[in-house]
């Protein structure tokens, strides 16, 4: 896809503002401070912050004195960065200019400061102007030429190149004017030896190619300019912004600009040259130099260490300096001073003593470095002749004991092989890296050794490694030790001899030296210091808590419409059709679709954090009740292939390699006190390791309060908690019946009692109750109790009376059911205020309250 540039009048000028490298905070801004934008367009202010100091710092970046009018254009006006030394990061302030923005210039400041870690440095303040152009400058003219560069680069995806390698770009130029034009390409930011620009060749005469210095384009034509960028071999590793400029011959004032983002890759090459300055000494010190040259394009740091070899323990070594920091293409020199420690060990006569040592260079930053040990020799010459004179006199004085000395030398037992050094090559190993313990040792008089045996034991003496047996009875070393040992006439030095110890634990390595048969043949044993192989880290449950400590029990599942209708017909056979239809419609309106497990607001959820998730095989989630019994089937999550699908929406591994899970549904909805137990199953375990378990504090799921959905008398709902009804009866009439109906919320553990009879009943049903024809009071109570012991009572009082007594009185409902008033008119008024109308009257007649008012 071809990307064309726009004229400079519509493209914000891109410039670099960078602080001197001595400043601990480096700032690179992708703006010159004068930015132009059209209404309805966007503008991004990119800032690159680098920590060039020697310590970590928290750096504040914010926009200061931002005008109120453009405050809504930029939602992010301040941020913070935590950077280590040498680290850098980008920050973008995005301005979204609305289409109705007023034309004008808006001033603000960009401030960069680290007051906490660099208190002595003044804040970096950069003034910027955001110029909103008139709407007439919304787009460039159609006849303005444009150009595009391929491949396309951005500050997030710069193109990478190694020093010395060419990098080619194609610049597509499009002449949209109605005139023939000539275009030239310039790279003002790069040296001339970096840039090669090739224009299309022309043919002025047949067969003769002419090298063009410009691109000729007819109207509405497109041409290609080949741009080749070749960073020199000594180019430093960095990210560069290269400005490309295309100039038109017809319109010299028009400048078409674009930016290339180049990232010069680092390469590492360091050479060291070891020189001997003074190597033959008597009283003075030996002097050597190490010349180090950094031929790469990045800064390098080398640490030097001197290791004494044969006779090396006789001297002290001094490095000045011990560490070198070299800039690219820089050469530095470090001196090595060798000084004998004990002057009395200087040879008395002869050719002197040869002392060997080795200088090793290491890179503390772990950058590639060619291993090139530098070996040095020091000749410690014999003392001057005048210092030997006392020894000559001593030899003459001891001539008398020469015969005894000769006897001692002839019959003295041969030298015994001794272990001079035996230790592991490292003080610690890790089983997760597959490390194997390696040992090194030095033994004197190797010609007296018959066999070597290396074994590893635990602290209690149990055999954990080996034994490894090496036969040294021959004239040459065994093949197993040839690549690890150096045999001299008086010593055998072995390094990095691998053992078979790779399991986690502590090891005590023992070296047994078995001498050859003969006089003074005594076996020798040496022990190395304890060394440990760290076990593979086990996952650990850092935190296990519920999403919240208190929950409310989930409401019961409402039955379907068909089930509600069938229940209503079977249990309310005597109720009228309208009442049944009303109950069905009420049940249908209360019914709601069941939420899924992830959306259920009543389900108990858990949060947990687990370290080392890469060593996790699975998790087991168990819900227990107050008696520690398993309340729900355990949930098992398999982590062998990463986070399982059922936890993908709830879990994630953060930047600290910790498995963080939030709002994981446990399936618990029942009321009561429960605990959640989480068990972690590691990939590697043994019978001696304790299980990885964590348990939450008791979680209270509160029971739903008892609720009476429906309480009816003969199909009519009873709305009051204590309702009173009047019922006229005739003496001598047989038993009459009423129909009580009820429906309560069917929560787990809910108990329903209908008193005085039959007592415990179902949560939904009807009951035919016979009433005595004698006047009196009948009290019925519906009591609902939930699993937490909370209760709700609805009562109904039915008062029966004789409508035609000898002394006419009408029983009136006064609210408490215990009082009556005389008089037909007075009774009629009170009857209208009762809790409900009379339930039943004499067939073929009307009750007193149904009679119209009459004169006395």
Image: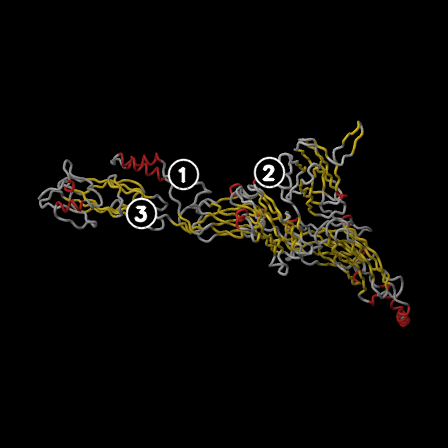
Q: Are marks 3 and 2 in contact (CB under 8 Å)?
A: no
Decide which of 2, 39 is in the foreground and name it: 39
The percent position of residue 462, horizontal first and vertical second, equals: 65, 55
- In-image side of 741 versus 379 (left or right): left
Q: Secondary structure at mark 3?
A: strand
- In-image side of 390 versus 69 (left or right): right
Q: Secondary structure at mark 2?
A: loop
Residue of label 1: 593
Q: Can see residue 517?
A: no
* Residue drawn at 34 percent across, 35 percent down: 563
The percent position of residue 758, horizontal first and vertical second, equals: 26, 44
Q: Are marks 2 and 1 in contact (CB under 8 Å)?
A: no
For disc 2, the neighbor class at 10 Å (few under 14, some 14 to 19, many from 20) is: few
For marks 3 and 2, the one nearer the N-term is 2
* Image depth: mark 3 or mark 2 in front: 2
Q: Up-down: is 233 above or below 574?
A: below
Residue of label 2: 139
Residue of label 3: 784
Image quadrant containing the N terminus: top right
How far is disc 3 from disc 1 in space, using C-alphas?
26 Å
For disc 1, the neighbor class at 10 Å (few under 14, some 14 to 19, many from 20) is: few
How far is disc 3 from disc 2 in space, using C-alphas?
77 Å
For marks 2 and 1, the one nearer the N-term is 2
Q: Can see residue 623?
A: yes
Question: Could you tell me how many numbered marks the image carries?
Answer: 3
């Amino acid at each position: 896809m071809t990307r064309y540039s726009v004229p400079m009048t519509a493209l914000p000028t891109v410039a670099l503002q960078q602080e001197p490298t001595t400043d601990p905070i480096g700032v690179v801004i992708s703006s010159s401070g004068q930015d132009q934008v059209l209404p309805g367009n966007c503008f991004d202010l990119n800032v690159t912050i680098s920590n060039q100091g020697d310590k970590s710092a928290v750096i504040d970046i914010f926009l200061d004195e931002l005008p109120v009018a453009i405050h809504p254009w930029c939602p992010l006006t301040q941020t913070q960065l935590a950077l280590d030394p040498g680290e850098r990061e980008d920050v973008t302030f995005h301005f979204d200019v609305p289409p109705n923005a007023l034309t004008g210039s808006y001033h603000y400041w960009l401030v960069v400061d680290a007051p906490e870690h660099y208190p002595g440095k003044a804040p970096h303040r950069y003034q910027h102007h955001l110029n909103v152009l008139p709407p007439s400058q919304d787009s460039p003219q159609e006849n303005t030429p444009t150009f595009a560069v391929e491949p396309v680069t951005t500050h997030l995806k710069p193109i990478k190149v190694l020093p010395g390698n060419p990098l080619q770009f194609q610049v597509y130029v499009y002449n949209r004017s109605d005139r023939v034009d000539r275009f030239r390409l310039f790279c003002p930011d790069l040296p001339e030896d970096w840039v090669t620009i090739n224009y299309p060749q022309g043919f002025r005469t047949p067969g003769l190619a002419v090298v063009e210095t410009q691109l000729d384009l007819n109207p509405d034509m497109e041409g290609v300019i080949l741009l080749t960028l070749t960073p020199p071999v000594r180019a430093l590793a960095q990210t560069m912004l290269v400005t490309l400029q295309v100039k038109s011959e017809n319109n010299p004032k028009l400048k078409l600009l674009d930016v290339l983002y180049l990232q010069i890759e680092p390469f590492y090459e360091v050479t060291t040259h070891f020189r001997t300055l003074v190597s033959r000494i008597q009283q003075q010190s030996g002097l050597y130099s190490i010349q180090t040259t950094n031929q790469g394009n990045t800064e390098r740091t080398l640490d030097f260490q001197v290791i004494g070899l044969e006779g090396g323990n006789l001297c002290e070594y001094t490095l000045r300096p011990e560490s070198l920091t070299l800039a690219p293409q820089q050469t530095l020199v470090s001196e090595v001073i060798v000084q004998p420690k004990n002057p009395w060990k200087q040879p008395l006569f002869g050719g002197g003593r040869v002392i060997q040592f080795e200088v090793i260079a290491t890179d503390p930053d772990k950058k590639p470095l060619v291993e090139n040990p530098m070996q040095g020799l020091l000749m410690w010459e014999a003392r001057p002749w005048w210092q030997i004179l006392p020894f000559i006199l001593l030899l003459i004085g001891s001539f008398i004991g020469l015969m005894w000395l000769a006897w001692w030398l002839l019959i003295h037992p041969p030298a015994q092989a001794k272990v001079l050094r035996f230790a592991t090559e490292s003080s610690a190993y890790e089983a997760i890296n597959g490390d194997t313990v390696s040992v090194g040792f030095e033994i004197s008089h190797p010609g007296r050794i018959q066999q070597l045996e290396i074994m590893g034991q635990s602290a209690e003496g149990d055999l954990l490694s080996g034994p490894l047996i090496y036969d040294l009875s021959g004239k040459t070393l065994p093949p197993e030790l040839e690549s690890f040992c150096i045999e001299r006439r008086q010593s055998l030095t072995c390094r990095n001899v691998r053992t078979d110890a790779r399991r986690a634990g502590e090891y005590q390595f023992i070296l047994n030296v078995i001498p050859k048969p003969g006089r003074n043949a005594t076996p020798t044993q040496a022990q190395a210091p304890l060394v440990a192989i760290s076990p593979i880290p086990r996952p650990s449950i850092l935190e296990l808590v519920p999403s919240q400590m208190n929950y409310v029990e989930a409401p019961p599942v409402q039955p379907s419409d068909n089930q509600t209708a069938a229940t209503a017909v079977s249990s309310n056979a005597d109720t009228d059709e309208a009442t049944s239809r009303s109950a069905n419609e009420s049940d249908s309106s209360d019914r709601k679709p069941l939420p899924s497990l992830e959306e259920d607001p009543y389900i108990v959820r858990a949060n947990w954090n687990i370290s080392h998730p890469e060593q996790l095989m699975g998790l087991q989630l168990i819900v227990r009740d107050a008696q520690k019994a398993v309340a729900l089937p355990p949930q098992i999550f398999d982590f062998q292939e990463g986070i399982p699908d059922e936890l993908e929406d709830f879990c994630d591994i953060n930047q600290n390699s910790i498995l963080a899970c939030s709002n994981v549904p446990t399936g618990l909805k029942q009321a009561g006190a429960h605990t959640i137990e989480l068990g972690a199953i590691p990939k590697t375990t043994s019978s001696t390791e304790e299980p990885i378990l964590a348990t939450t504090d008791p979680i209270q799921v509160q029971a739903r309060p008892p609720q009476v959905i429906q309480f009816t008398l003969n199909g009519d709902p009873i709305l009051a908690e204590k309702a009173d009804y009047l019922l006229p009866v005739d003496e001598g009439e047989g038993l009459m019946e009423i129909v009580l109906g009820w429906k309560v919320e069917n929560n787990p553990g809910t108990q329903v009692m209908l008193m005085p009879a039959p007592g415990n009943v179902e949560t939904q049903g009807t009951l035919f109750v016979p009433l005595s024809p004698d006047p009196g009071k009948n009290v019925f109570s519906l009591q609902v109790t939930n699993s937490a012991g909370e209760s709700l009572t609805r009562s109904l009082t039915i008062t029966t009376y004789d409508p035609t007594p000898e002394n006419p009185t009408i029983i009136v409902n006064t609210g408490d059911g215990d009082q009556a008033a005389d008089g037909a008119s007075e009774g009629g008024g009170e009857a209208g205020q009762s809790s409900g109308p009379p339930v039943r009257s004499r067939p073929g007649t009307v009750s007193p309250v149904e009679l119209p008012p009459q004169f006395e």
